[in-house]
Amino acid sequence: MDLIIDIGNTLHKLAVFDENGVLLHVYHENRLTIPFLEAVFSQYPIHQAIISSVGKDDDKVLRWLDAHTQLILFSHQCQLPITMGYASPETLGTDRIANAVGANTLYPNQNVLSLMAGTCLVADFVNEKNEYLGGSISPGLRMRFQALSHFTARLPLIEPENIDFLTGDTTKNSILSGVMHGMIHEINGIIRQYSAQYKGLKVILSGGDAQMLQNSIKKRIFAAQNPILLGLYKILRLNASED
């Protein structure tokens, strides 16, 4: 079996795939520890693993994984099932590469835009020639609320929530209207611009805030829970040893 590890800015995600590529379990942890890995390994006979990290790595955890699996540390230098058209792949977050591979796995040979609504709002685009061209990065929902509170003297910190109004009649509601509608308009605008340039565009939405945002998106989208984990699995299988 294969273990997929995605160390993000906020959460550490782990997934176990069986020998047929079936996703068996997904874990979400605040921090990856050796006792937790030992518990996972006691449940599943894991032989190979891949780790993608945009956060801080724990050397002890890496050494433990290397001792117990055939471990691949994912980077842009790994073999990919898509063509890299990004001008500076060495600066590209591995989560974005995996996201692009996952999107292409779901929609091969098609124009596909994968949006991740998490710590940041990230867009990754793969064209019908299976070429990854790049995308965009902007602040996520919570970062926008935090910025308003941090960079002003009196605006309060507000938690995201679904709203059914445009005009805010209190300071809280004004912040909610500005941030929530601003994010929704940004997403719809990105989709509209890509749709104008690329025929038959497929759109994927994932990330922690996807459920909150998906009903406000005008174009039909596919709400995918784990495109990064799927992409990492495909990359692992492509780079795994046959031994």
Image (tube, grey):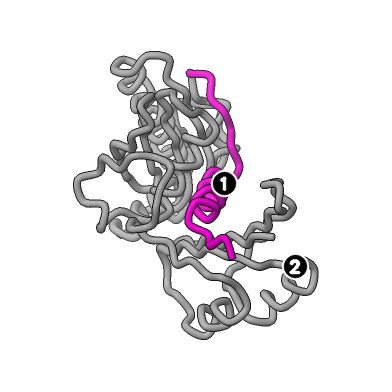
Magenta stretch: includes residue 225 = yes
Residue that mark 1 sits on:
230
Disc number for residue 45: 2
Disc number for residue 94: none
The magenta region covers 219-243
Count of number-bearing discs: 2
**Image quadrant occupied by the C terminus:** bottom right
**Image quadrant occupied by the N terminus:** bottom right
Q: How far across and down, in percent of the image, does residue 170 sit?
A: 46, 39
Residue 201 horizontal side relative to residue 67, left or right = left
Mark 2, secondary structure of its residue = loop
148 in relation to 127, above or below: below
Q: Nearer the viewer, residue 126 or 137?
A: 126
Residue contact between numbered discs 1 and 2, judged by CB atoms under 8 Å:
no
Q: Residue furthest right?
A: 43
Q: Looking at the image, can residue 72 be seen?
A: yes
Nearest to N terminus: mark 1 or mark 2: 2
CA gap, disc 1 to disc 2?
19 Å
Q: Looking at the image, can residue 160 be seen?
A: no
